[in-house]
Structures are given as C-alpha cells and as structure tokens.
Amino acid sequence: MEFEPKILGIACNWCTYTGADLAGTTRLQYPQNLRVVRVMCSSRINPSFIFRAFQLGADGVLVGGCHPGDCHYNTGNLYARRRLAVTRKILEFAGIEPGRFRVEWISASEGNKFAEVVREFTEQVKNLGPQTKFKIK
Amino acid sequence: MSRIGVFVCHCGLNIAKTIRVSELAQFASTLPDVVVAKDYKFMCSTPGQEMIAGDIKEHKLDRIIVAACSPLMHEQTFRKVVENAGLNKYLVTIVNIREQVSWVTHDIEEGTSKAKALLNGAVYRARLLAPLTSRFIDVSPDVMVIGGGIAGIQAALELANTGKKVYLVEKNSTIGGHMAQFDKTFPTLDCSACILTPKMDAVLQHKNITLMTYCEVTEVKGYVGNFDITVKQKARYVDHDKCNACLACTEKCPGKGVSEWDEGLVKRKAIYIPFPQAVPQKPVIDRDACTFFIKGKCRLCEKVCEQKAIDFEQQDTFSTVKVGAVIVATGYDLMNTKPLVQYGYGKYPGVYSALEVERLFNSAGPTSGKVTLRDGKEPQAIAILHCIGSRDKNNYEHCSRVCCMYSLKFAHLFKEKTSADVYQFYIDMRAPGKGYEEFYNRIIEEDVKFIRGKGARVAESADEPGRMIVEAEDTLTGKFIKLPVDMVVLSPAMIPRSDSKDIARLFNLSTDKYGFFMERHPKLAPLSTMSEGIFIAGVCQSPKDIPDTVAQANGAAAEALTIVVKDKMELEATTAMVNPASCCACQNCIRVCPYGAPFFNEQKGVSEINEALCKGCGLCASVCPASAIIARHFTNDQVLAEIEGLMEF
C-alpha cells in the first residue's frame, strides 16, 4: 500500500485558514493528508507545537500565516517569521529533513495557492517516506 | 471528567456526500468523555439547534462539539445556542468538515478518515477548554466614512439622519467622486448632477456631518467601538474660515495645472475649485502648478483676496478623532490603457478613455457638452470598444459590470449630439439590472451598430490621414472587420483606487488579487470585513453601478449603526493573562505587543495585561520564556492536545 503521510497544518485565522475555507468553497481538490489546527495568529505558534507534532508521528508540518506586512495584528507574523526560521534550523540540527517543514504566507483570497501548496507539500513529504527521527511512539 | 456532546451535520449532501456522517457520529461516541453523539441533516436549522439545546439539558453536557461548516461561518450561531441553553459559549468547538474536508475531496474513504482525525483532535481539545467571561467596553458613538463619492455621501447622510455624528473624509478638495463627472446616468438618462449635487449640499449643511475634504487618514489605532483615527488635513494654502468663495483669486491666477476633473483634457488654474458645483465651494492651491511655489514670486491671488484668506505659510495639520465604526468607500480608478499599445491610447488623439468621454458630454466639461475631437471637428464614425483590460486574463479577469450599460448610454448621447455612425464592439452584452435590457433594446432601435467581437487593434488609416482603423473579428459572421473611424472610445477595467493598498494596510483589510477589499462573507456578510467594525461599500469592494452602490452604502450605514447605537459592546474573551507566579519579569511581552496591552507592575515585579487593549493574537504567550502567559482559548495545553488528537488517526 502506498505510504500516506500525516501532515499537521497550523494556520492563522485571518489569512491562511480563511484561504483554506475559500479553497473549499471553490471546490478545489487536494490530498486529505493535512489536518489543520486554527490559531488566531501565526505568532501564537510555539515551536513546541511543531516539535510535539513530529514526536507524535507527523511526517510533515505546514505553517501558514498572512503575508508579511498584512498581518491582522500588524506585526505578529514578522515575529513568527523569525521564530519559524530558528525552528527550521533546530529541526535540521536534530536531523529532520528540511523538506518536512514548510512555512507559507497565504492570504484569505488565495484559495488556489493553499490547494497548490498542500498538493506540492504532500507529494514532497510522501517522497521523503515516514518520519522516524523524532517519533516517540 | 467532562461530558461532551458531538453533533455531526450532513449539511444536506454537502457533507454527507463525501463523509459517512453516521459512521462519524458512531466513531465519536467511542471517544473519551463523549456522552452523546448524533448526526442530523441541518444542524444550524431550528430543529438542529433545539436538538443541541435539548441534549445539553437532558445529558447535562458541559462541552459541545459541532462537526459542520467552517467556524468562520457558524461558530457564533452555535455559541448562541449553547449560551441560551445555559452553557458558557466558549465551550463550543467547531470541527470544519465541510470547507476543509467534504468540499476538497471526492473520495468518501479519505473524507471520512480525515473527519475522524479532526473530530478526535476536537475532543482532546474540548476536554481542556475553560469557560470564559466576556468583556464589555464603552462604544464611541460617532462614525467615520472614508471616501466622498456617492457611496460615502449616501452612507454619511443615512447615518447623520439617525442622529449619529459622522466624519466624512475625502482626499480631494471636493466631494462628489466619479459620479460628479458624469453627464447622464443609465438607464433612465437622469442628469447626474441633478441627482447628486443636492446630496452634496445636504452633506455640507447637515449638522451631524463634519466634512473633512482635502484630508487623508494617516493612522488608525484602537479597535471596534473605539477607533482613534488620525487624519491629515493637507495644506490648502487658503484659510477656508476666512474665504468667502468669491473666487476672484481663480480668475487672476496665471498658473496652469492639469484638471483632474476634466480627466486632463484641459488645464485649470493653480488656485482652483475642481468644478463650479464643488462642495465646499472654496479653492485650494496646487503647489506643483503655483507660480509662487515654483518661481518664488507672483502671489497675485493674495493681492486680489479681500478676505486675506491666502496663506502661503500654511502647513499640513493632523487631528485625531474617536469613532466606533468606519465605512470605507474609496471607489475606483479606470485602468491605465496606455500599456495596451494595440489600442493606441495616448498615441492617436482620436482614442478616448470612458471618463474623458463623460466629460465631453457634460455641459460643465471642457467642450461645454459638445462632442468634438481634439482638433475641434465633429466625429463622423465612432467605435466604442468594450472590455478593455477587463474580462481579460492578461490583465483583469473580472467583468467591470457597468461598461456595457454606459457604452449604450454613450451611443445614445453620440446619436443625440452628433450625426456620427456609432459602432459597439462587444464580447457579450450584459444588461441584468432593472430597466437595463429595455434600455439595450431602445438603443438597438436608435440605429447603433453592434458588432459581436472584441476590438483587437486600433491602427492608423493609410488612406485617410487622421482617421483610424478598428480591427476585430465579428464572431457572428466569422468575418474579420476593418472599420474606419475618427473616434475610438475605450471602456477600461474598473480597478481599486491606486492608494487603496494604503487604506487596506491602515484598516487591516484583506484584498483580492486585484486589490478590491474583501468582504467577510461573499453572500451573508458582503459589507463587513474581517476587521471588526470596518465596513465597505461601493466599487472599492467590486465593480458595481450607482443603484447597487447606493444600496450598499445604506446597508453599510445600517451595519455601522448596529455598533454605535449601543453604549457598550461585547468583546471576545479570548485574551491573554499572566500567571504572576511564573513571570520572570523579562518584559518580552511588553516589547512585542502591537497594542501595548502588557505593562509592568513595579509593585508586584511582574507583567500584567490590560485586557481592554488585548486582541488575543497570542504573540506574547509564544515569546514568554517562562510560559507564564496564557493565551485564553488557545493555551499551550489546548493546542498540544488538539495536535495529539489529530496525529492519532
């Protein structure tokens, strides 16, 4: 049977989550491997959410926020951008393939982009195979 | 131990088609703490809501999970349901199995298993939810309207008539907007000025409206119910309190500027009022055209002004107003068609853009309402080219909605004012408004020629100097046409104002790919935005005609009123709080918060959060090295539990 990765999505309420809804409203199709957690702002994302997801067996993590400069809370995603850049480095250091972690800025009107990113990322994670480095059970 | 009730919605077949809903409910009943799990055709309907309320009482439920459409759609609906049933409204969790599951797959296996994972995550999270207490804040009773076109004018008047104070901010020196440039309006051929100028005057006279022309918003602080908006009054170099509108200055002025009002077809003075019926009737000085500002001497206007109103030293001034709600009605620009070189705009003098033609028809326009070409001659043959840049994937995909109708109006006016042959080059005729199809039929009978084919190119005529050839494929006959004309009218795409990006940024509005402001919901909340308390009306949202714009303006006024009519309003309780026992006093939270909500309590030696200012983004919680800040409703524990639940399946 083909490997079906589990992918965690964390999306901000105002842009990426709304963009994901738009993808649905316009009936765009994408793989069902992604499960999205909604937070109010990408700046709410504590790196531990991402580490924990990998520990719990996520094969990939996709984070989505508003475009830099367009944050609903003015500057939240700028902090998120920096923090996620460090998170990426830590993940790499710990041996997680960089391809398993992706940050995308997707606005509320970019349903197309959301679907496209999910398709691409799912394919990429699929090719990487199961994630075992961090998985604890 | 919590007692969870799970309610799975079929949404007709929207969900049930790609998710086995009864299996999902069955699955839910096996999850920890779930006491009851049901599925129903329409959970948001009255019987659905009653079922939830009934079960809360019957099973003593203390957590409700609704697996249905997006929380952005019906979270508030279900919060009300549980609140009415006596449960804290923050104990509802919505699982989005429609927009993010059933609508994005055709595979019922995949859909069902993803829905199970999402539901499992929700159960894990719901167990850790805590009841929250809503906050109430005082509401500032005034409203700001941005944009003084017909949308802004209408919204301002409606609100002012209810007794509310309105600040109407307009960046130009007069209100009126594009509608004031038109001569006639379709399909009734009402004189535009006759229906607009009384409204402009009503704005000026209204005791509840503070008219702020030649002003721009520069900063927005605060939140719904309490916006502090800084407005820049651009220097007019004329003291409007002293000016008595005699306009002697505009007669003497030797300066020459481009008349925006006449779309650049003629020059105006450097000290000017845009048009005779402008509101207010008081001039401003265009620095870039003023001889004094350019060469350092002149000051003729100053000499003729008996009121001593001219003030070359005047500076921009800033003021801050407090309002409870804002209506954004910033309107549109026409696309610049110069880059579409195939149409020769800017190259051939006989090619006009639609607004320029509006000015040619207008009795207050550069030709006093006579239709003449730039060389003063009357055109013999006129081609009106629809869909220039709109309905065009290379430029703007959207239909600009009004071009078919105003092109018909142009044809009628050309027929009335000239003896020219008039040709319409159209892709499709779109006449869906009240009386529009009838108007179309009338124009057909007026001997206007309709060619179904998009104008492909405008070229110079080789045989007749000064004339042009319009090339197109007539898709009804399949023939390629080359039509000699001496006037070409382009109907360009309507696009958002060039500075609408700045407005979007100031007010945190989302925009679509072309920059039109996005509504909260395309059908059910077309005038609200994702920014609470900010409403939109008119073409800044998408192209529309005057009746639709006016209807939207009235709607937006009503929406704004629902906020400012109350003394107090409820805010989301999902704010951050500091656990003083863990706070390490690093003050990171204070440094990062965009709203200045956290502050340092010197007495206690810890950070605290002013909940009235907190918007609940959760940024501080993530930068707190001691995990002392709790982002209510999105706590670390709650989010981590949800992730755990999602990853189990």
Image (spheres, coloured by chain):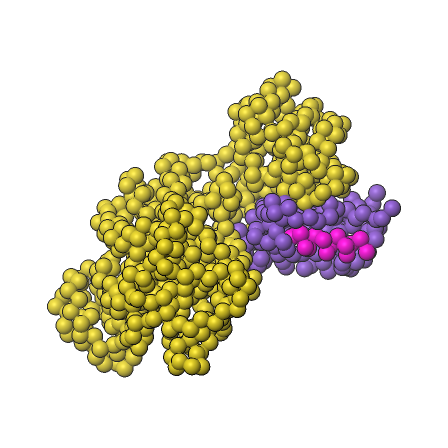
Chain colours: A purple, B yellow
Q: Quadrant of the C terminus of chain B?
A: top right
Per the rendered image, the range of residues in magenta is A114-127
Task: Kindly identify the residue that appears in the image at 36 percent across and 66 percent down.
Answer: B421
Determine if the magenta segment contains residue A115: yes
x and y percentages locating residue B583 in the rendered image: 60, 45
Quadrant for residue B558, please give it.
Answer: top left
x and y percentages locating residue B550 in the rendered image: 36, 47
Residue B165 sits above or below residue B38 on the image? below
Q: Is residue B80 left or right of residue B569?
A: right
Q: Magenta residues: mostly which secondary structure?
A: helix
x and y percentages locating residue B177 in the rendered image: 33, 58
Residue B379 sits above or below residue B606 on the image? below
Determine if the magenta segment contains residue B255: no
Q: Is residue A126 visible?
A: yes
Given residues B164 and B623, the one toward you in this image is B164
Task: Kindly identify the residue that appears in the image at 45 percent across and 69 percent down.
Answer: B337
Q: Is residue B372 left or right of residue B57?
A: left
x and y percentages locating residue B647 in the rendered image: 76, 42
Given residues B271 and B316, the one toward you in this image is B271
Task: Kindly identify the residue that appears in the image at 64 percent across and 39 percent down.
Answer: B98
Q: Is residue B77 left or right of residue B138?
A: right
Task: Kindly identify the residue that appears in the image at 83 percent across and 50 percent down.
Answer: A130
Q: Is residue B212 visible?
A: no
Q: Is residue A103 left or right of residue B572?
A: right
Residue at far top of view: B58
